[in-house]
Amino acid sequence: MRDDAELLRLVAAVLSMYLGERRDRSMGDVYQLQRGLHAYAEGAGLAPADRPRSRALTVLRSHGLSRADLSRQWVAARASSGRAATLDMNLVSELFPAWCWHAIAQVIIDGPAAASEQVERLLAKLVSGSESGPSDLPVSRGTVTSYAAPLIYLTKGLREFHTRGFPCAHLEQWQHLPKIGIPRAAARRRDTSAPPLNVVRTGYQNLDAKLKQRLGAESDDDELDRVRAIPPGRLRCAGVWRPARNLAMYVLAFDLGARIGALCDLKRDDIVRDRGTRPDGSLYAALALRPKKTWLDDEISWKPLPARALRVLDVYLAITDKLLLETPDYRSGKPRPREAPLPNAPLFVGSLSRPNRAMDTATFSQQLAGRSPRPESGRKGAPPLLPRADGGGYSVHRLRGAALQATRQAAHESSAKLEAVDPEALSEALIDHSMRSDRDGYADLSTPAGRQRLSGIGAELNEESLTEDRGARKKRDSRSYELALRKRIALESELARRRQIRSEVAQRAQLERTPNAVLRLLVPLLLDEEREDLENQLRAVEVEIDKLQNDPGTMVPIADDEPAAALTDDFELIERSLRSERRASTEPDEDAPAIRGFLTISEFAEIVDVASPTARRWCQGKVPFPPGDSRNPWEPNKVPLDSSLGPRRGRLIVALINPSVFQTKSRQRLLTQTLARQPAGWSPVHRGAALRRPAYAATDERGSR
């Protein structure tokens, strides 16, 4: 009997240690230990009375406790009782049913060697598939580790109890601890990529549109007024409370890059509306966030709130307070007053019927990732707010990754405005990671004040990325590009016409010796002034076209729900269309006779459908195919180019160009139409200049008829 009592106290101490020293706020580690003990008990020939159940968090909440409270109770128990300390036995018994106690007692009795062997066997069965049955997918390394880690922690704890001299005879054999080998398993990695920013923006827009629609609000500024104006009964029936809560959590999760657990732990009094003063003298609000994980449980990271984040919080709190204070609870069949929230009530609650109970993380996670239907239990499915391409949804933690990426991207784009702020330090301060660039705080970046300042900048950047054009996908402005090209074409045509008029007037003034000749001498001067003005306009249009082609600042946003194909601009299609229009407006009849025997380099490029720079490279002997290839327009050493009029008025002699270049009907038609008209912008002197054949072609001929 004495040994049984000692064994019972040891099991109670082991389970208390496990609950007090572990830090999983969702109590998932309790389920993992139950699962491992269940497999161990079955392998040892025991028959567990029940299966593992993941209701530890519910049990804890029923006692009004959190995991942090358990940790504090454990520290107090250790201070008073040492290693023999235990937590409240009623609570421990609820978290771990009797079969778990029997399984741990069996581990203690088996001893380290037999227990380690049994654990290795059950892990091997798990990897081989004999433990969980046939499956299309192999068991991953993470699954094996989740089985092994609690049991390894348990065996190490027993070894520690023996070292500390815990009074139990069964501990005598726990003087050593063999290493438990974990078998190799498939390294099946999950996709941990963050959602694209346009998906995050679309999720925000859907939540915001639903709330505005149900409130009847047209803008952000109207939301609070509508909440105050709508009668309580109608507000309750409008179904606005959950959309308002989900929108507030969504905005905070992205703007602040906060973990879902930290958001669920927020209290109403964590919103401080006069936390500090901006450079312009106005006050700003801040949120007292408790990141936990690598931070102490009660350690606060202050997060200045952007304007939109504070507004959605105010709307959510206004709706919550109005429904709690002015509408009855009908759950019992007849109306009765609702429970009033306490001063330190949770900020986000799962149900209005329990305003002093914080919302659990699974509730909001299902909003983002969706929920699969369960027909057997009558549960309906829900589509994800952040859908993946495979039909699933992104988790809340992936949204945190999107927040980090958005902060860094926005910081790079705003580098001039942010001066010397490092984008990496900015994102690390926002999501409460250790700051590698200022580990010791000498640069005042990782200090509390520095983190608060950087967090405020990061939150503002993220809000702009979420709600404004900064975060929208952008494409080149096709409409402005088409207008600029049309303007350039019109200016070039007008400039060519003015040059031609000036040339003709100047020639007539030289030939005629009449009183009007003096007037004709003044006309070219006036035309020169107009030409200079047109040339200045043309240069400005060329600069505009270059910006539209290359400057990201001229890009225009597209809708977030547009497919990826919408990002492809149609600049090339616009250029081809305008070239066709220009040819159609100036082309002569296809049967018109040729009036010249040469092509300009630009005309040749248009006919063979290549860029002008490409055609100029060919004129330098850099033909597209090896020498001797019949597809070349000419041989590298036999370029049919006449440069006697200067480099800007090179003339390609058609008779010396490889005829196969013009073999298609469309090219033949373009060639005929081009040779039937004079080159645009050429003076009569240049049009009629003698066409000089290159040395290899022997003879000269006139270029125009």
Image (tube, grey):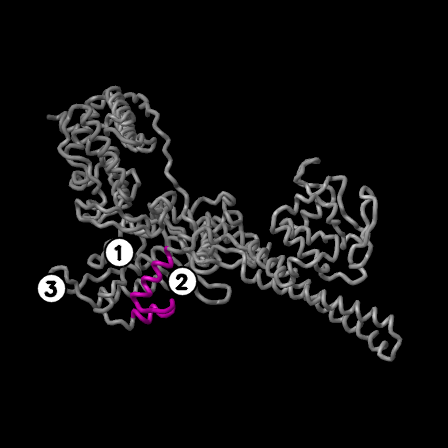
Residue 70 placement, left or right of 299: left
Is residue 139 positioned above or below 530 on the image?
Answer: above
Query: Which badge, 1 or 3, comes first in the chain's sequence?
Result: 3
Query: Which badge, 1 or 2, comes first in the chain's sequence?
Result: 2
Q: Position of residue 396 (x, y in %)?
A: 35, 48
1 or 2: mark nearer the eye: 2
Q: In the image, which residues are magenta? A: 203-227
For the residues bearing labels 2 and 3, Cβ distance under 8 angstroms? no
Q: Secondary structure at mark 1?
A: loop
At 37% from the left and 38% from the top, the residue drawn is 190
Question: Observer-nearest residue: 508 or 482?
Answer: 508
Binning the other alpha carbons within 10 Å of mark 2 as few (below 14), some (14 to 19) or many (20 upward) gives some
Residue 72 appears in view? yes
Magenta stretch, main secondary structure, is helix
Question: Observer-nearest residue: 67 or 609?
Answer: 609
Q: Which residue is mark 2?
A: 308
For the residues bearing labels 1 and 2, Cβ distance under 8 angstroms? no
Residue 488 appears in view? no
Q: Secondary structure at mark 2?
A: helix
Disc assigned to residue 349: 1
Q: CA distance from mark 1 to mark 2?
A: 21 Å
Quarter of the picture holding the C terminus: bottom right
